[in-house]
Amino acid sequence: MTAVIEVPVIDIPVATDVTFRVRRYLPEIDEEPHWEDYTVALFPTDRVLTALEKIKGDIDGTLTFRRSCGHGICGSDAMRINGRNRLACKTLVKDLDIKKPITVEAIKGLPLEKDLVVDMDPFFAAYRAVMPFLLPEGHEPTKERLQSAEERARFDDTTKCILCACCTTSCPVYWTDGAYFGPAAIVAAHRFIFDSRDAGAEQRLEILNEKEGVWRCRTTFNCTDACPRGIEVTKAIQEVKQALIFRRV
Amino acid sequence: MQTHIFDVIIVGAGGAGMRAALESGTRARTAVLTKLYPTRSHTGAAQGGMCAALANVEEDNWEWHTFDTIKGGDYLVDQDAAEVMCKEAIDAVLDLEKMGLPFNRTPEGRIDQRRFGGHTRNHGEAAVRRSCYAADRTGHMILQTLYQSCIKAGIEFYNEFYVLDLILNEESGEPVTAGVVAYELATGEIHIFRAKSVIFASGGFGKVFKTTSNAHTLTGDGVGIVWRKGLPLEDMEFYQFHPTGLAGLGVLLTEGARGEGGILRNASGERFMERYAPTIKDLAPRDMVARAMVQEVREGRGAGPNKDYVYLDLTHLPKEQIESKLPDITEFARTYLGVDPVTELVPVFPTAHYAMGGIPTDIDTRVLRDNDHAVPGLYAAGECACVSVHGANRLGTNSLLDINVFGKRAGIAAAEYANSTELVELPADPQMSTISLVEGLRSGTGTERAINIRRAMQETMDMNAQVYRTEATLKEALGDLQELKRRYLNVSVQDKGVRYNTDLLEAIELGFLLDLAEVLVVSALERKETRGGHAREDYPVRDDVNFMRHTMAYREVSAHGEEIVRLDYKPVNVTRYQPMERKY
């Protein structure tokens, strides 16, 4: 390895005023949600989450949203930004059109609790319902179970899910029928159905074959577009459908 | 107000909390309280792996791992605890695999392993492949797998329940555990959870710093609660700065990037670690690499318009390797800095990452109230605890190991204790201090906003108590913190509501952060040596004669009602490794 290489030159960015149009709802005060505008100075590389933190800190402390890790791996800050489901911490100002106000609202399809906070319990209940855990068969080995790199790769994509609900709450079927399991739960089922160590595929497929199961999917691809982890959600759902038709994984 | 009764209450649903729940839940009636949802916990942000001497890809054994952990911790590690951790590491990894964790695999289908900082073959000869991993999202997979296993086991969770107080009572003049007080975020309601055992698994407090890899929610609540109860905190001056945070942002880029062959370079492109750690170079322990990076910048060899960072270079690695082994950090660099690691150098600089110190425990995770006595029924595991397996500097991957090994031990110990004892009576009005804390902030008319105090605290900590410290900078920080604590008394919140009042929550969190920042700085002032993550420029060498000992900080209140941090010390447990000069 050579000790010295070429290094690049980088410009210093400047801050600009950006307006956010936020759909507000304080349940103890407001009868209905309404829109309010806030303007904050931001760098192009700032995240929408940075803007929300500034609004809450410097303008209006009542603005309420969830957030934790701040870099797209905890899944707390899913919201609709300019009409699309995204994570606020993974959406940068430079990737939005700042000539008009940037709209921010809660994700759809789950009960609105306050401002950008929704009730996540129905979402996690659907996740739990598909048995998202390993169901092995036979004796427990003394060392690790063997799994080839190819077998491991078969379900790699769906292990990335952070349960942010961007996919499920972008699904038009889910908006009209909250009993539908939704894409995220099917992704979780896929992760285990296609794991070579698992023997519970039959049970999960039975669950997903029900009325509110996988057949409700209308392949609109909203879920794939919404996924901040780049999971091919619709493809995973299609694979589960095929497994149901052919009963083979 | 509602009252609940359990055998075991676990505070926090990250790796340590859920690993504990899996053990405790099968033995005793258990509930897990988390201020988030379990899958939002910061264990999910860990990337590079979990070390265990499986010897799947080359010769290795747990004794070498123990030695590396002790040397990496600059000999402040309690050696009996490190032995336990490294020995139990092997089963800890196999347990996770059996639960379904999708580890990367070798061509033979075994769990694959890769190199990591400070992990060596035969006591420092060369880097060893010891880290078991799932791409660069090992923590994510651990968190998901543990949550999934908790669902399978039917563990009871109270999500978005913020624990604000520990309830202790007295028996024969000594403190015993009676439960916790929690604030339900959705409703603003106060809940009392009576329990025979309480396990704190509430994580760290990186938010005392401005530049940090830590989540917004890592505010040291559990550590702060224990502190306010008059129980000691151990080795709080030892805070780890991870070398490779994205410059200016602090977002973590795994050490696994260097494990895969990545190289650190200064502004002129030089591989500077060759000068600081000639044998293992870029895979030296984090404290040494972080200091080297700061040194490069101070001496004018930093890169960028302000010459304030260095580069992580992966461009010589095959695109295939980067995208399959390091996909997440590749995406972080692309998303947040617009830099593609496949073809470009990534600007990096140290970021506040991990508290080596915390709530002192013994190897069975029992919380100590002094050097020799545990509080019956009280346990702690994970980053909030100090066993101490990390000493003055934690090795990479040993935190994911810590949470699994000591989480498991905590779950077993807490449940067994609960099954051997009766519920402790509640003291009178155990909810009162929580109610006055919450209502004081909500109904207060003070003029201070929490965010301004938080910003000032983070600025002074980054400026004065970071990678390098001196008596002067630490005194500066202490003065600032004491002033900020005075201003904090005048904080009020704008949101006066009861439902999802995050304005209130953040103000409470700030109170814990201020307390812990002060303990950190006071402990750092008195440690007049350089050891591991604590680098004093005015005392640049390790002093085993005077400081081969743990700091034990106690909160005391003077006759005038003033809070005082009193320092005491605890000997290091040395079994078979005498301190040596630390070279790599």
Image (spheres, rainbow, N blue to C red):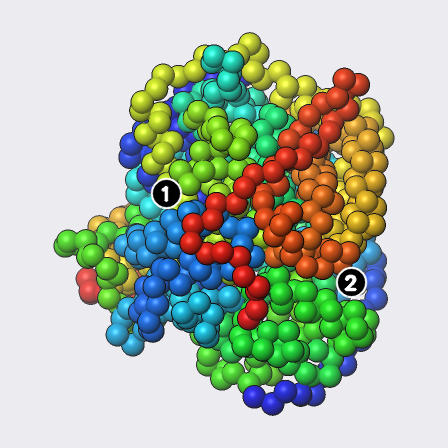
In the displayed structure image, the side of residue B411 where residue A94 appears, left or right: right
In the current view of this chain or complex, which residue is farthest to the bottom? Answer: A2
The residue that appears at 68% across and 69% down in the rendered structure is B292
The residue that appears at 53% across and 37% down in the rendered structure is B360
Q: Is residue A91 visible?
A: no
Q: In which quarter of the view is residue B253 placed?
A: bottom right
The vertical placement of B71 against B513, above or below, is below
Mark 1: which amino acid?
Answer: Lys
Task: Please name whichever residue, B233 or B149, is drawn nearer the observer in this view of the structure.
Answer: B233
Q: Residues within 10 Å of mark 1 (few under 14, many from 20)?
A: many
The residue that appears at 43% across and 50% down in the rendered structure is B575
Are dots 1 and 2 in contact, CB under 8 Å? no
Task: Please name whichever residue, B373 or B262, is drawn nearer the observer in this view of the structure.
Answer: B373
Q: Which residue is mark 1?
A: B408
> Which quarter of the image is occupied by the N terminus of chain A?
bottom right
What is the chain identity of the residue bearing mark 2?
A
The residue that appears at 75% across and 31% down in the rendered structure is B493
In the current view of this chain or complex, which residue is farthest to the top? Answer: B428
The disc placed on residue A43 is 2
The vertical placement of B498 against B319, above or below, is above
For numbered disc 2, what is the local secondary structure? loop
Residue B383: give x, y in percent of width and height.
Answer: 53, 46
Mark 2: which amino acid?
Answer: Phe
Task: Please name whichever residue, B239 or B425, is drawn nearer the observer in this view of the structure.
Answer: B239
For numbered disc 1, what is the local secondary structure? helix
Q: Residues within 10 Å of mark 2 (few under 14, many from 20)?
A: some
What is the chain identity of the residue bearing mark 1?
B
